[in-house]
Image: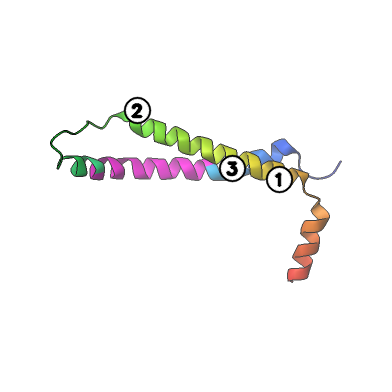
Amino acid sequence: MLGASLLENFSFFVKEYIGLVALAFLISSPIVYYFMNQWLQGFTYRIELSVWMFLMGGIVTFLIAMLTCSFQSIKAARENPIFALREECMLN
């Protein structure tokens, strides 16, 4: 049997996207914390920002990325490679 398996496709997509999602989370969390804290200072009744709020956002983002990776890997595994080659040859 030739070609990549479903697990190989999934790991290919996961390595790419999850690393980018983690990097974006690490960069954006301190920036968002600073600006949200500054914005909340203007309110009389305000909440305190806590770590769990950021972790929930990161977990939801991670789950969305995993669902996207799963969908794309299943789609790539089920697709006939001849169609992809034909379209690539037609573009060149």
Q: What colour scheme has been applied to the protein in the rendered image?
A: rainbow
Q: Position of residue 57 (x, y in %)?
A: 40, 36
> Could you give the CA–CA distance between mark 1 and mark 3, rounded to whole angstroms?
11 Å
Q: Quadrant of residue 25?
A: top left
Q: Position of residue 67 (x, y in %)?
A: 58, 38
Circle 1 Cα neighbour tier, 10 Å, few/some/many (<14 / 14–19 / ≥20): few
Write the start and end of the magenta stretch as one range: 18-35
Extreme residue toward the right, this view: 1
Q: Secondary structure at mark 1?
A: helix
Q: Which residue is mark 1?
A: 75
Circle 2 Cα neighbour tier, 10 Å, few/some/many (<14 / 14–19 / ≥20): few
Q: Amino acid at mark 3?
A: Thr
Q: Nearer the viewer, residue 33 or 39?
A: 39
Q: Position of residue 34 (x, y in %)?
A: 24, 42
Q: Amino acid at mark 1?
A: Lys
Instruction: Identify the image quadrant of the C terminus.
Output: bottom right
Circle 3 Cα neighbour tier, 10 Å, few/some/many (<14 / 14–19 / ≥20): some
> Could you give the CA–CA distance between mark 1 and mark 2, rounded to whole angstroms?
34 Å
Residue at the (68%, 43%) spot, across then down: 73
Sequence order check, earlier mark of 1 and 2: 2
Residue at the (16%, 33%) spot, across then down: 45
Q: Nearer the viewer, residue 48 or 84?
A: 48
Sequence order check, earlier mark of 1 and 3: 3
Sequence order check, earlier mark of 2 and 3: 2
Q: Secondary structure at mark 2?
A: helix
Q: Quadrant of residue 87?
A: bottom right
Left or right: 83 with respect to 16? right
Residue at the (81%, 63%) spot, across then down: 86
Which of the numbered marks, if any, corresponds to residue 52? 2
Residue at the (73%, 70%) spot, across then down: 91
Q: Which residue is mark 3?
A: 68
**Is 39 above or below relative to 84?**
above
